[in-house]
Image: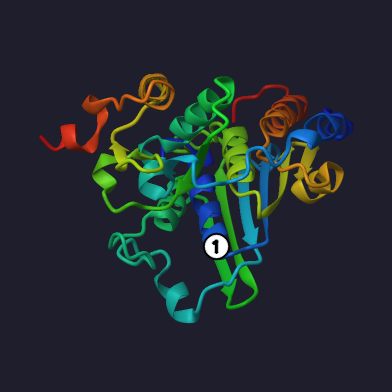
Amino acid sequence: MKSLEELNAIRNKVKGRVGLRSEDENQTRVVVGMATCGIAAGARPVLNAMAKLVADKELENVAVVQTGCIGMCRYEPIVEILEPGKEKVTYVHMTAEKAEEIVDQHLVKGNPVVKYTLGAAEK
Amino acid sequence: MMPEISLNVLDVAENSIRAEASLVQILVTVDLEGNRLEIQIKDDGKGMTEEQMAKVTDPFFTTRTTRKVGLGIPFFKLAAEATGGSFQIESRVGEGTDVTTVFQLDHIDRMPLGDINSTIHTLIVYNPQTDFLYRYTYGQESFDLDTRQMKEILGGVPLDAPEVSAYIKEYLDENKLETDGGAIV
């Protein structure tokens, strides 16, 4: 069985760094809908993929969070990206594969992936 | 319907978080001798009124304002009853809610349990203000994960720090494997 002992070592390693990731007004928020509609449509792997990509690429200024039902259940899984000073971008029918492209293009390079947005889906 | 039972668990446990629970207990029991899979989700949240309780399994009732249907509990109930199992919910205002479902383990219509570790990991890491006690039992073996114990060791280091999050996933994966030997439930 994996023990809790290892947590001691992790605490000592991480302790000094905590506080760096605190919420501030310059933070980008990635919001994943995790109500029944989102979960049934496949939001859990999307949320986990987003969080893993943001952690792997060490995007310190990006927080991946969950929310309830956004009210557009037919477009789930939905991911909203809120960057300070910019308009909200809503991605629809999300998958873990699309998440990869969106992290690379939108979060790293600053170019929203228009083809996956709500605006493109409604056309 | 949900494609796997672990997604019902995630969905129903999210209700506990919306009910402002401070502790959510999730007990997954694979009872091989009794041919049962039992799942209990118990919280100390704000509970439901008798009026809400009467409607909780009605798909056309929800407390949400963003849509008019509430399918989480009806899905869970239907998935259990389709296997000849049972669904039970008890709730008291100010005390909490306790949902217990029993599935017949070898029933052809039973959904797979699925990736229960991802469900537990997601709940813990994205709801760091809520405590979780998770117990997985397979036959005679079992293991626990208690975030209150983890928080005590971690001091102020949050459960969603990347290293801690990775540790929690490994803890779940390694201990589940030792408990059930990699059986697909």
Image: B179 above or below B155? above
In the image, what residue type sits under mark 1?
Gln
Where is residue A44? Give x, y as percent: 47, 36
Where is residue B162? Give x, y as percent: 66, 31
Where is residue B105? Give x, y as percent: 57, 38
Which residue is at 30% across, 64% downward?
B60
Front residue (pair B61, B14): B14
Q: Residues within 10 Å of mark 1 (few under 14, many from 20)?
A: few
Image: A31 above or below A69? above
* Left or right: B59 as drawn, with respect to B33: left
Front residue (pair B63, B163): B163
Front residue (pair B157, B127): B157
Residue at the extreme left: A123
**Location of the N terminus of chain B (image quadrant):** top left
| Residue B138 figure quarter | top right
Which residue is at 52% across, 27% downward?
A54
Q: Secondary structure at mark 1?
A: strand
Which residue is at 55% across, 20% downward?
A57
Image: B86 above or below B147? below
**Location of the C terminus of chain B (image quadrant):** top right
**What residue is disc 1 on?**
B88
Front residue (pair A8, B108): A8
Where is residue A30? Give x, y as percent: 44, 38
| Residue A43 figure quarter | top left
Q: How is the image coloured?
A: rainbow
Does residue B30 show up?
yes
